[in-house]
Amino acid sequence: MMASIRAAIVLAVLLPVTLVAIGVQMIALRIGVPDPGMVPTLWHGLALRLLGIRVRVHGAADPRRPLLIASNHISWTDIPVLGAIMPLGFVAKADMAGWPVFGLLAKLQRTVFVERDRARTSAIQAGALGARLATGDVMVLFAEGTTSDGNFVAPFKSTLFAAAQAALDAHADDGQDGVPNVTIQPVAIAYTRLHGMPMGRFHRRHASWIGDADLIPHLGALIREGGMDVEVHFGVPVRFEPGSDRKQVARRVEAEIRGLMVQALRRPGASSR
């Protein structure tokens, strides 16, 4: 009964706020006022509070630009978790653009949609992502290419790290001075507690949204349950320069994220609930 009441309250607040935010963001993207990066950040923060997800951040984003954040991926909730920390752009699978509501929200946050399995379009998409990086936008790449159950980090796909090279090319095309480079920063996301109690391997699946699982039932379960803690660990940045091997960079970033995640799951921070 209480879970149903909680779900009704969350939806009663979140739905109208989302409609207002959509309208404001459309205006922001058209005229630049308010800052188009501010509205999504505020919305993500509110959504997390309503869902009962508390974020604990360790470290900080590197201040240098261009900055590409490479992260592990557990659930759709990773997007508001990262999006509430700072203004960000995301890289998502092309089919997400057609999703009801979520596709629209992604477009309003200027998500770069990619088709990972089509070699013909990958260069164009990497170029679009590289152009965003070159203009100073911080972009997030979920480098596993899929979601996990929250207990491990899957092998990274190095293909989209080509966006870093595209950003270098954009730097050269603009005739900018200095040695071009892109900062790639590993970020580990770990869901660690449920109602203040440390999660075990089985309970972490409560947070995860794997593969082709239906989104609406998972969203409903999170709304009814609430009370999750998630840790975000910013790792040691890697400089991508002309001549860098993207496969080696991808492996280095993957190893860093795997180490940070193991640390977070073994020794989760104390809950403030």
Image (spheres, grey):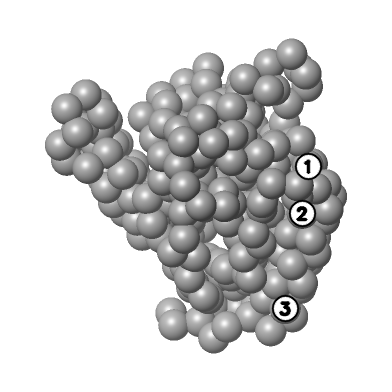
Tell me which amino acid carries mark 3.
Answer: Gln
Residue for badge 3: 263
Residue pictured at 46% horizontal, 54% vertical: 65
Percent across and percent down for residue 17 are 24, 40
**Screen quadrant of the C terminus:** bottom left
Q: Are marks 1 and 3 in contact (CB under 8 Å)?
A: no
Which of the labelled discs sits on residue 249, or is there none? Answer: 2
Percent across and percent down for residue 50 are 36, 55
- 38 left or right of 98 in image: left
Instruction: Measure the alpha-carbon separation of dots 1 and 3.
Output: 24 Å
Q: Establish if 31 lies above or below 267.
A: above
Tell me which amino acid carries mark 2.
Answer: Val
Q: Are marks 2 and 1 in contact (CB under 8 Å)?
A: yes
Residue for badge 1: 158
Q: Circle 1: is it few (<14), some (14-19), or many (20+) Cα within 10 Å? A: some
**Of residues 227 and 180, which is closer to you in this image?**
180
Residue pictured at 60% horizontal, 60% vertical: 185
Instruction: Specify which label sits upstream in the sequence, 2 or 1.
Output: 1
- 216 left or right of 175 in image: right
Instruction: Measure the alpha-carbon separation of dots 2 and 3.
Output: 21 Å
